Image (tube, helix red, strand yellow):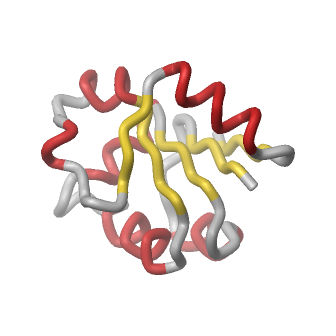
Amino acid sequence: MLHILASAALNPIMVERIAAGSAVLLQQNSVWALRPGHQDFVCLEALLAKSCQVYVLLDDLKLSGLSELSLPASVQAIDYAGWVALTVEHEVIKTWH
């Protein structure tokens, strides 16, 4: 399953509802969870601990002032073509707003 986290902030209830091994795409405001020290960073770590495949939309990453070099090793930056590939790969998609 692919979870698209749009403008939603990460929270423990959301993390609980995302199954282990799911794909998670961070975009818009959810990108802030990638900043160590941010209140949502703990939830990002919980997703990674559940072996979720975490992706971030490259354009939103750049808009937040973060770089690919600052990403945790298990988070992959993707472009719009990569986003389309994720939607083709996953039959079930849940968008969180």
Tell me: 63 left or right of 95: left
Q: How many marks?
A: 0
- Residue at image location 34% in from the left, 71% down from the top: 42
Residue reaching furthest right?
A: 91
Q: Quadrant of the N terminus?
A: bottom right
In the image, what residue occupies the spot 17% across and 35% down?
67
Is 42 drawn above or below residue 39 in the view shown?
A: below
**Is residue 34 positioned above or below 60 on the image?**
below
Say left or right for 58 vs 10: left
Residue nearest the observer in this picture, 74 or 15: 74
Compared across the picture, whether 83 is left or right of 34 comes to right
Where is residue 4 shown, x and y percent of the image?
Answer: 62, 42
In the foreground, 91 or 45: 91
Closer-to-camera residue (88/33): 88
Residue 63 placed where, x, y %? Answer: 27, 22
> Given the current orientation, which residue lies at the most extreme bottom position?
49
Whole-percent x, y for residue 75 in the image: 36, 53
Is residue 89 found left or right of 45 in the rendered image? right
**Which residue is painted at 15% across and 48% down in the image?**
70
Q: Quadrant of the C terminus?
A: top right
Which residue: 49% across, 69% down? 47
Residue 74: x percent and y percent? 35, 61
